[in-house]
């Protein structure tokens, strides 16, 4: 029974992590400058309204603030990103931004932090791909993959940004955050890039197996999309898997185009472009039209009820 209560409290926290107290319309006198005002903060000097006495709670808050651990700090936002990723991103899209550390800054700090720790402890030693048994025309693709292994942060950011397009197509008609814009999609993936760097870090600590990373990041994409867009189990799962497939083929397409541009090989390249473009188009339109149909069904079911 106790565990059930804990889970309930955790779920409630996931939805509303920060409680703001409102001092209401009552007038009070600022303890610092003497100005009479209503609200949570003095408009003249900025001191917070409330009890003048020094309490244990105040001491605790002061110590947390000294370490930069207040509610919208980086550590607190990272904890939220790990424990309520979809709700945190949803809050940000809905304009509840005060509770979150700015996402681009967070990606930057986490990336730099990861690179420093990886250097110090020598933990990110993924083997380079080798050219053996590779046809010569794919050699540059190996070069590109090795560049991503050497620059994991750029690689992960590129790969997560590939998710903007399938996410935009498949989750347009979602129960929550309907019709999200591409710009919002970019922000979603910036948060996901931060998560993927943390997942790389975790999987590098335990082992250097790519498998653990893939399990972690897939699980995080599932949980995030479920919390953010509000589809149920299967609805989230198939859209997510389809999005992964599209992101993979977009990645392939980007590599093929890079090869063409770098090498200036135009002969025989059009058929190689054709296959990924065809697959991407088919997957995108299938996911889009199925999602639109289910949204229409949901709407008619709702209309029939009322
Ligand atoms: Zn004041």
Image (spheres, rainbow, N blue to C red):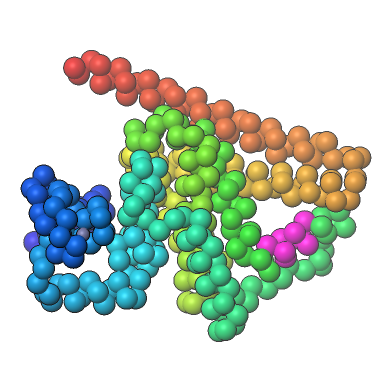
Residue 154 in the figure: left or right of residue 244? right
| Residue 27 pos. (x, y %) | 9, 49
Asked whether residue 135 is drawn in magenta, I would say no
Which of the pair 5/189 is nearer the observer? 189
- Identified at 10% across, 54% down, the residue is 28
- Identified at 63% across, 60% down, the residue is 154
Where's the C terminus, which quadrant?
Answer: top left
Asked whether residue 145 is drawn in magenta, I would say yes
Where's the N terminus, which quadrant?
Answer: bottom left
| Residue 296 pos. (x, y %) | 37, 20
Q: Quadrant of residue 163?
A: top right
Q: Quadrant of ligand 1?
A: bottom left
- Identified at 66% across, 48% down, the residue is 251
| Residue 105 pos. (x, y %) | 50, 59
Which of the pair 270/59 is nearer the observer? 59
Q: Which is the main secondary structure of the residues drawn in magenta?
A: helix
Which of the pair 111/105 is nearer the observer? 105
Q: Quadrant of residue 118?
A: bottom right
| Residue 277 pos. (x, y %) | 70, 35
Q: Which residues are magenta?
A: 141-148
Q: Quick check: can you spot residue 19?
A: no
Residue 84 in the figure: left or right of residue 39? right
- Identified at 47% across, 71% down, the residue is 202
């Amino acid at each position: 029974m106790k565990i059930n209560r804990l889970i309930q409290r955790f779920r409630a926290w996931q939805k509303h992590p920060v409680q703001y107290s409102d001092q209401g319309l009552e007038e009070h006198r600022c303890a610092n400058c003497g100005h009479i005002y209503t609200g949570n903060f003095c408009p003249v000097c900025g001191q917070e309204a409330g009890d003048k006495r020094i309490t244990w709670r105040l001491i605790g808050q002061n110590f947390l603030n000294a370490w930069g651990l207040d509610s919208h700090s980086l550590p607190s936002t990272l904890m939220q990103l790990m424990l309520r990723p979809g709700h945190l991103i949803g809050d940000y899209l809905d304009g509840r931004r005060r509770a979150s550390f700015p996402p681009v800054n967070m990606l930057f700090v986490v990336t730099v932090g990861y690179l420093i720790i990886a250097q110090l402890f020598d933990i990110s030693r993924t083997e380079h791909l080798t050219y053996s048994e590779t046809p010569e025309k794919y050699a540059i693709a190996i070069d590109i993959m090795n560049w991503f292994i050497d620059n994991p942060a750029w690689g992960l950011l590129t790969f997560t940004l590939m998710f903007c397009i399938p996410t935009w197509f498949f989750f347009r008609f979602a129960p929550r955050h309907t019709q999200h814009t591409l710009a919002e999609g970019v922000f979603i993936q910036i948060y996901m890039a931060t998560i993927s760097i943390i997942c790389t870090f975790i999987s590098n600590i335990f082992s250097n197996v790519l498998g653990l990373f893939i399990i972690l990041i897939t699980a995080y994409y599932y949980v995030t999309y479920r919390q953010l867009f509000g589809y149920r189990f299967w609805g989230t799962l198939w859209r997510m898997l389809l999005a992964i497939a599209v992101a993979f083929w977009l990645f392939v397409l980007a590599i093929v185009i890079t090869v063409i541009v770098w090498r200036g090989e135009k002969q025989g390249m059009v058929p190689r472009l054709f296959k990924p473009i065809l697959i991407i188009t088919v997957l995108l339109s299938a996911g889009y039209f199925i999602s639109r149909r289910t949204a229409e069904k949901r709407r008619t079911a709702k209309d029939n009820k009322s």
